[in-house]
Amino acid sequence: MIFGWCFKKYADILDELLDYYGGFEGLSRKIEIRCFCIDPSVKSSLRFLRTTPWAREKVESLYLYVLRQKAKQKP
């Protein structure tokens, strides 16, 4: 579990990733998780992430990557 994960809701993190990658299509290219590829919705994705540790780890890793990329872009 990443530090601060409990402070930021799963929904907020998923929303941020969806914004960064332009929706589920872009996100599913980065992480091949079925809930992002087949009939995706925020509700079903959150349910899956809350109950599936390996998927949550992948999302956490990608979220940390996105945070680093955003930090690099700031002047």
Image (cartoon, grey):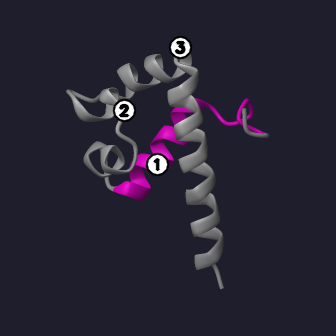
**Range of magenta residues:** 4-21
Q: Secondary structure at mark 3?
A: helix
Counting labels gives 3
Q: Residue sitting at 58 percent across and 22 percent down? A: 53
Drawn side of residue 66 relative to residue 2, left or right: left
Answer whether residue 26 is visible to the viewer in this image.
Answer: yes
Q: Secondary structure at mark 2?
A: loop
Mark 3, Cα crowd under 10 Å, few <14 / some 14-19 / many 20+, is few
Q: Position of residue 49 (x, y in %)?
A: 50, 23
45 w.r.t. 27: above or below: above
Q: Residue sitting at 45 percent across and 16 percent down? A: 47
From the image, tell me which residue sits under label 1. 17
Residue 5: say if magenta: yes
Q: Secondary structure at mark 1?
A: helix
Residue 33: say if magenta: no
Drawn side of residue 61 relative to residue 14, left or right: right
54 w.r.t. 64: above or below: above
Query: In the rendered structure, which disc, 3 or 2, sits on the residue that comes first in sequence?
Result: 2
Quadrant where the N terminus sits is: top right
From the image, tell me which residue sits under label 2. 33
